[in-house]
Structures are given as structure tokens and as C-alpha cells.
Amino acid sequence: MAAIEKFAKRHGVDVVSFKKDQRKDDVTREYLVKFEAKEGVVYIGRAQEKARVVRTERRRNAITGATYPWVVDGSAFVNYYYFYCVDEDFGPFFLKFCSYFPYNAKRCLNGNEYAKCQLRKQDIAFQALDNGILSCADPKALQRLCDELDATKIDGAAAQMAGPFAASVRRQRSRRRLSLRTVDPASRVCLDPSP
């Protein structure tokens, strides 16, 4: 965790300790308004949350009486670190790191934000919702953009976000596939048909 604090200090990124029941989206919205770069880390959040953890406990051999370590699953409240970032192609996203073994990590991209970024790049007018698009000057282009968002684009973004680790991973020729088990694709586009 010292490396996170060091990173924040070196890059001038705020570390925010979330309060109980504080909405992370509200804090992020305030930071995004002030963020001027095209890409980068907006801020780092820290929150105490329940996590699946692996611990050791001492067990005793029934025959010999000797003790031995045993690995057990459990849960505990631990610090999670959220890196709230902006990507030129995907918009706002976050990386979530658990500070306790087995050090789980999660990356959350929002397909709606991806579509908004692509519409802006193509100068197509649209009316944004908080987590969606209300109307669009070219609904077919919007649908095409949504259809084009696939694992290849997401994996490409992951490699780009990996920064200094990307070359190391390529050298080892090992790579984790993106788990799509939590992807919630929007299967319909609802636009206001009025002119």
C-alpha cells in the first residue's frame, strides 16, 4: 500500500478515504468536473469493504498431536483501493484493488461511456443521461458503435492500461483473458423518435 501512496504523491493525485455510506459516484463526479487531461488517474479512493480472504489457522494432528498450518477461506473487512481514471476511448473507469491476500483486482468499464466517447470523436450530436444516451442525431451510427464494442477492443484497452507491465507480460507470453462473466451488455437502444 506504500506504493500506492508513493504513486499518488509522485503524480499529485488525491487519495480520498470514503466515509461509510458515501456514494463513490458522487465523489467521482466532483473530481471529473475538475479533471482537464484527456487521460489519466483522476483520484484514488480508499474504502473498508468486506472481502473474501484466505488465512491460515493452526490445526492439530489427531494421532501425533503435532500442529500444522491449514489454509481456510474466510471474510474480513479490508481496505480496497479504487483508481478512478479516464481513458480517451472508454471514458471514466476504475480499477479496484484489494489490500489483503489473495489481492483480487477488478476493472470496471462502462459501455455507455465508451459510446459517448466514440460519438464525440465522430462529432455526432447526442443527449447524454447519467448512465446512457437519451437521443442521438444518428441512431444507426450509435448502434454500430455499440455493436463494435467487443472483447478485442476491451483487451486492447487493458493492454494499453497495463503501462509498464505490458512489455513484461508480452515477454512472458502469458496473458489473462478478460472475464466476461460480469459484463452486462445493453441489448437495446432506446431513442426518442421525435425530430
Image (cartoon, grey):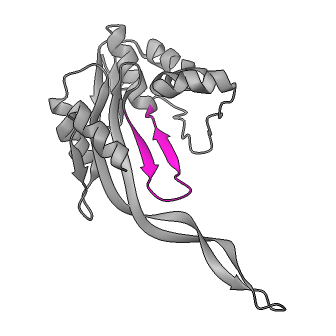
At x 25% / y 56%, what residue is drawn?
Answer: 18
Residue 138: % across, % down: 39, 12
- In the displayed structure, does residue 121 sit left or right of residue 184? left
Work out whether residue 151 can be spotted: no
* Rendered residue at 69%/29% (across/down): 174
User: Between residues 144 and 157, which one lies in front from this camera angle?
Assistant: 157
Outermost residue, right direction?
63
Look at the picture and state if 27 lies above or below 177.
below
* Residue bounds of the magenta highlight: 93-110
Q: Quadrant of residue 35?
A: top left
Please, is residue 97 above or below residue 164 in the view? below
Which image quadrant for residue 175?
A: top right
Q: Quadrant of the C terminus?
A: top left
Tell whether position 193 is magenta.
no
Could one spot residue 31 in this view of the protein? yes
Identify the residue shown where x is 31% and y is 26%.
40
On the rendered structure, is 127 left or right of 72? left
Judge whether 54 appears above or below 166 on screen.
below
User: Count the marks: how many?
Assistant: 0
Q: Residue 72: x percent and y percent?
A: 65, 72
In the displayed structure image, the side of residue 149 where residue 87 appears, left or right: left
Residue at left offset 54%, top offset 41%: 184
Q: Could you say where residue 59 lies in the image, as x and y percent from the top left?
A: 69, 83
Is residue 96 found inside the magenta-colored segment of the image?
Answer: yes
Residue 78 falls in which quadrant of the image? bottom left
Residue at the outermost left position: 34
